[in-house]
């Protein structure tokens, strides 16, 4: 349990730091697009084009953030195998706290008292969850569950791309939520994946859950990038928290055998609800991106101001 918690906390730190670095890279790309008065970075619906997202993804800040995301993914996968999903996913999703704190320095975001209070609620909820968590389930499921996971992942991620592109600049929270559902699908997929322990490559490569993980990870990363381009980093991350926490936690309890300590079920439920509520509160109370630009420096003073919150890279 302790090793699993430490692993989940380390994954949370990697994800949180990666989100802020990706946001810095996205905003740098937005300034460069604005400096050239480019219209190719915006779709007809006001959302970021694929070329705009690709440009954001090749900034060094974004690439470093992506490396941290991959490290966080590996650590999170280990945590999902060692802890109940309602605990591992919630601890990992506490990267919102890391994101909020680092965004003060790197993005110039100012947190107000209600936001600090919401972060404190999330911290308290994590303590409750850690106290109440029992042993994780075995993860053994019927092969049909693996196919269902793949099918639902394809529908959610494919439909998500279409809807987000249609909504354009209004899709920030939805893109964050869908990316969170994708990352939540990764947690479920890792838990039920065959051929890992002991390692059996034929069983691993023939498992539909493996391909659900790849699809959810790739598209989830793209949708998260879009959310960072067009919305508040805290708001996008909070929406991601809800997506990657609620559904996997419920699936873990109902189908994968996760449970709390005897007599602590109410503590687990309370901690879970408080964690989600605290994350939603940070998104609701988050300041607009007018405050999200990096603090003025000599270099920034020579660049055009970043676009308004409704504008897009």
Image (tube, rainbow, N blue to C red):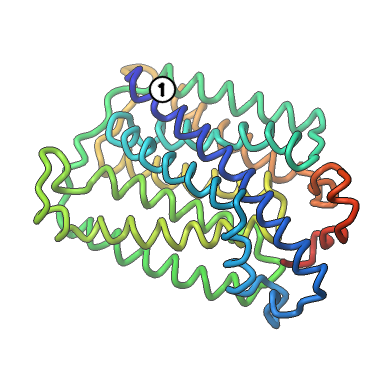
Residue at the image point whose x is 44% and y is 65% from the top: 156
Q: Is residue 232 left or right of residue 258?
A: right
Which quadrant, please, contains the N terminus? top left
- From the top left corner, tell me how far across and down residue 107 is, in percent: 75, 43
Q: Nearer the viewer, residue 71 or 11?
A: 71
Q: Is residue 40 above or below residue 75?
A: below
Q: Is residue 194 left or right of residue 154?
A: left
Residue at the image point whose x is 60% and y is 51% from the top: 60
Q: Label 1 neighbourhood size at 10 Å, few (<14), some (14-19), many (20+)?
A: some
Q: Quadrant of residue 39?
A: bottom right
Which quadrant, please, contains the C terminus? bottom right
Q: Is residue 36 above or below residue 201?
A: below
Element under label 1?
Answer: helix
Q: Is residue 39 above or below residue 172?
A: below
Q: Quadrant of residue 96?
A: top right
Q: Is residue 80 left or right of residue 160?
A: left
Residue at the image point whose x is 46% and y is 27% from the top: 9
- From the top left corner, tell me how far across and down residue 198 is, in percent: 10, 39
Q: Nearer the viewer, residue 301 or 107?
A: 301
Which residue in the protein does label 1 denote? 6
């Amino acid at each position: 349990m302790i090793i699993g918690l430490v692993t989940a906390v380390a994954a949370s730190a990697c994800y949180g730091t990666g989100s802020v670095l990706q946001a810095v890279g996205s905003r740098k790309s937005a300034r460069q697009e604005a400096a050239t008065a480019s219209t190719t970075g915006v779709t007809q619906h006001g959302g970021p084009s694929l070329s705009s997202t690709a440009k954001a993804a090749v900034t060094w800040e974004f690439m470093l953030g992506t490396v941290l995301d991959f490290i966080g993914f590996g650590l999170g996968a280990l945590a999902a195998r060692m802890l109940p999903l309602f605990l591992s996913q919630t601890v990992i999703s506490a990267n919102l706290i890391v994101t909020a704190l680092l965004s003060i320095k790197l993005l110039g975001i100012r947190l107000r008292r209600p936001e600090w209070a919401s972060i404190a609620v999330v911290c308290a909820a994590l303590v409750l969850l850690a106290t109440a968590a029992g042993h994780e389930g075995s993860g053994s499921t019927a092969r049909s569950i693996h196919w269902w996971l793949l099918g639902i992942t394809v529908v959610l991620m494919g439909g998500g791309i279409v809807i987000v592109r249609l909504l354009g600049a209004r899709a920030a929270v939805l893109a964050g939520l869908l990316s969170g559902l994708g990352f939540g699908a990764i947690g479920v997929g890792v838990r039920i994946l065959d051929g890992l322990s002991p390692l059996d490559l034929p069983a691993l490569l023939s498992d539909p859950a493996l391909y659900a993980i790849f699809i959810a990870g790739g598209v989830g990363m793209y949708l998260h990038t879009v959310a960072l381009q067009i919305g508040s980093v805290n708001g996008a991350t909070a929406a991601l928290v809800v997506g990657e926490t609620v559904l996997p936690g419920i699936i873990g309890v109902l189908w994968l055998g996760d449970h709390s300590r005897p007599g602590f079920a109410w503590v687990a439920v309370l901690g879970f609800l408080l964690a989600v509520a605290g994350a939603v509160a940070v998104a609701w109370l988050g300041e607009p991106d007018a405050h999200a630009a990096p603090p003025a420096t000599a270099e920034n003073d020579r660049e055009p101001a970043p676009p308004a919150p409704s504008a897009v890279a």
